[in-house]
Amino acid sequence: MSLDPESKRKVQSRHESNENCSSLQFDERLGRIMNPSLAEYHVPVHMDVPEIEVIWTDIPDPHAPMGARGIGEIGITGVGAAVANAIFNATGRRIRDLPITLDKLL
């Protein structure tokens, strides 16, 4: 199968971006990033992430109620923190326990 020129450019760009990510210095012993700042290495963006193949399964999850499997939880994990930060910016009160209710703000 032959790629069209635009697809070839995207693949080449993705490969070059992935190579730039290798400048990350990571201490596996301490589990810390050792670069002094984020300015020293390429932060991956959408074009840098390889294509993800989604598969569907009819096999129930034995560890979940009714065998249900999750599909979109990863995409919303930052929402609670974003809302909490917005409330902090608006009120000056930092609430660290969810759910954030009016009585916690008063």
Image (tube, grey):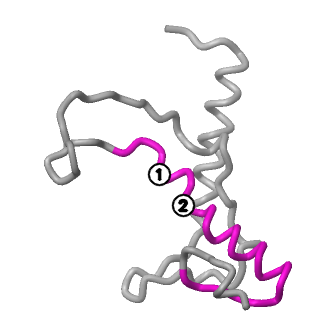
Do the numbered discs 2 and 1 sit on residues whose CB atoms are within 8 Å? yes
In the rendered image, the quadrant that contains the C terminus is bottom right
Viewer-proximal residue among 97 and 10: 97
Q: Callout 2 environment at 10 Å: few (<14), some (14 to 19), or many (20+)?
A: few
Rendered residue at 30%/43% (across/down): 69
Q: Is residue 61 left or right of residue 11?
A: left
The kind of residue tagged 2 is Thr
Residue ID for mark 2? 77
Q: Determine the image quadrant of residue 70.
A: top left
| Residue at 66% across, 12% down | 4
Query: CA separation, marks 2 and 1?
Result: 7 Å
- Residue drawn at the location 70% of the way across and 27% of the way down: 9
Residue 58 appears left or right of 91: left
Indicate which disc residue 73 carries: 1
Q: Is residue 79 left or right of residue 56?
A: right
Residue 22 x, y percent position in the rendering: 56, 62
Query: Image height check: is 36 above or below 40?
Result: below
The disc label shown at residue 53, or none: none
Depth check: give the residue in front, 57 or 105: 105
User: Residue at image x 55%, y 9%?
Assistant: 2
- Magenta span: 70-97
Q: Please, what is the three-letter code of the amino acid marked with disc 1?
A: Glu
Q: Residues within 10 Å of mark 1 (few under 14, many from 20)?
A: few
